[in-house]
Image: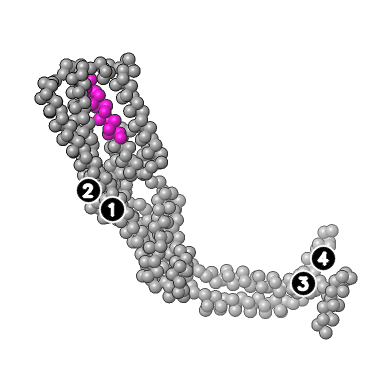
Amino acid sequence: MAEDRSVEFLDLVVIFVKRKKLFTTLILSVAVLTYLFIFFFIRSQYDSSALIIPSEQNEASIFGSLLKTFSNLPIGLTGANQSSSTDMYKTIVYSRTNLEKVVSKFNLMREYGLESMEKTLKELTSNISVEETKQGAFEITARATSPEKAADMTNYIISLLNETIVDLNVKKAKDNKEFLENQYETIKINLKNSEDSLNAFQKVSGIYDAEEQIKATIEAYADMDAQLAQREIEKRIIEKTVGFGTPQTKNAEISYDQFKEKVAELKKGIDKDSPILALNTLPNKALKYLRYYRNVKINEKLLEFIIPLYEQSKIEVQKNIPVLQVVDYGVPPEKRSFPKRTLITLIITFIITLLVYLVILLKELISNSSNPKVIFIREELFRFRK
C-alpha cells in the first residue's frame, strides 16, 4: 500500500518534470502579467490612523453634579462605559450627515468614479474603521488613494466627531437647563404661597410656637417630608437625564417608595417604638400649623437643592470646548496598505499553475488509463475531434 502511494506521487512529479519548460514559462508569464496588471490598473490605497481618548472634561457635566448631589441615595450611578462610548463614536462617524460632509470635502464621488451618493457612502463606509484598543483608547482609520488625503480625511473625521459631540452636549445642557428652570420657578412660587399661608394662619390662630415636643415632632415630619420631596425630584431628574426603564431609574424609584412607606407608617403611628408622635395625636390647630410649617420647610429645602443645579446648568450651556483628547493625529503613511502586489501575484500564479497542472494531470490519466469506460470516453472524444 505504501509503495503504491509512493509510485502515484512520483507519477505526479514526473508529469511536472516532463513539462518543466511549460510550467516555468507559465509561472514567469503569469507572475509578470499579474504584477504589471496590479501595478498599472489597481490604484494604491493608504491607511492613516489617529488615536483619541475621551476628555475628562466630558465627565464634569451637569450629570456629574447630580451624582455628587445624590450621594445620599443607596444607588450606584455611573457614567457611560467604554463599550457604549465606542458605539456612540461609531454611530457619529458613520452617520449619513458626517459621511456626506466627508464626501463633499474630498470630492469622493469623482475619486471613486461613482455617480450615486448611496454607493459613494457605502464605499466610504468600507474605507473607515473605528476600533477600541486594548488600552481603552479609540483608533480611527481612513483609507484613501494618497498618503496626504488619508491623513486629511482621518483628521477631518475627528473634527466632525468632536463637533457633533459638543453640539449634542450643548443641546442636552439646554434641555437640562430648561427643565431645572421650570422646577426652580415652580418651587419659588410654592415657597411664597406656603409662607403667606403660614403667616395668615399664625395671625388667625395665634399660634406662633408650639410646645417643645410638638415642635420637635413638626420639625421631624417637615424634615422627612422635605427629604421625600427631594427624593422625588431626584427621581425625576434621573428619569430626565438617564431615561426611563434604566437600572438607575428603577433604583431611584425603589428608594423613593421605601422612604415614602416608612414616613406613612410613622404618621399613622404603626411604629410604636418611634419617639415621634403620630399626626392623629396632635391637636387640631397644631396639625394645621404642622401642615403650613411643613410646606414652608419643604419648599425651602427644595429651593436649596435646585439652585446649585440650575446655576450649574447655565454654565453647561455656555461650554463649547472639545471633549476628545487626540493622542496621535493622522499622518501620511510611508507605505501603501492595498494592494499587496507580491502576495496577490503569488496567490494568482499558484492558482493558475495548479489549474493548468490539474488539466494536464487529467489528460494524462485519460490517455494512459486501461479502464474500458475511460477508453470509450477517450475514443468518443477523439472521434468528435476528427
Vertical order, 268 against 240 (above or below) = above
Q: Mark 3 or 2 closer to N-term?
A: 2
**What is the three-letter code of the residue carrying label 2?**
Lys
Q: Position of residue 103 (x, y in %)?
A: 40, 69
Q: Residue 274, percent across and down?
A: 30, 17
Residue at position x 82%, y 73% in the image: 366
Residue at horizontal 56%, vertical 78%?
37
CB-based contact (under 8 Å), mark 2 and mark 4: no
Tags 3 and 2 in contact by the CB under 8 Å rule?
A: no
Magenta residues? 215-232
Q: Residues within 10 Å of mark 4 (few under 14, many from 20)?
A: few
> Are there few (<14), some (14-19), or many (20+) residues within 10 Å of tag 2?
some
Q: Which residue bears the numbered disc 3?
A: 361
Distance from disc 4 to disc 1, alpha carbons, whole Å, reads: 79 Å
Q: Is residue 148 visible?
A: no
Find residue 115 and report its horizontal and vertical position in percent.
45, 74
Kind of residue at badge 1: Val
Residue at horizontal 21%, vertical 40%? 186
Q: Quadrant of the N terminus?
A: bottom right
* The quarter of the displayed image where residue 244 is located: top left
Quadrant of the image occupied by residue 34: bottom right
Within 10 angstroms of label 1, few (less than 14), some, or many (20 or more) residues?
Answer: some
Q: Which mark is residue 7?
A: 4
Q: Secondary structure at mark 2?
A: helix
Q: Which mark is residue 170?
A: 1
Q: Of the two numbered discs 3 and 4 on the same chain, state the one appearing first in sequence.
A: 4
Instruction: Please tell me whether mark 1 sits on a helix, a strand or a loop.
Output: helix
How many angstroms separate mark 1 from mark 2 (CA)?
11 Å
Mark closest to the chain's N terminus, 1 or 3: 1
Task: Determine whether the residue tagged by mark 3 lies in a helix, strand or loop.
Answer: helix
Q: Nearer the viewer, residue 201 or 119?
A: 201
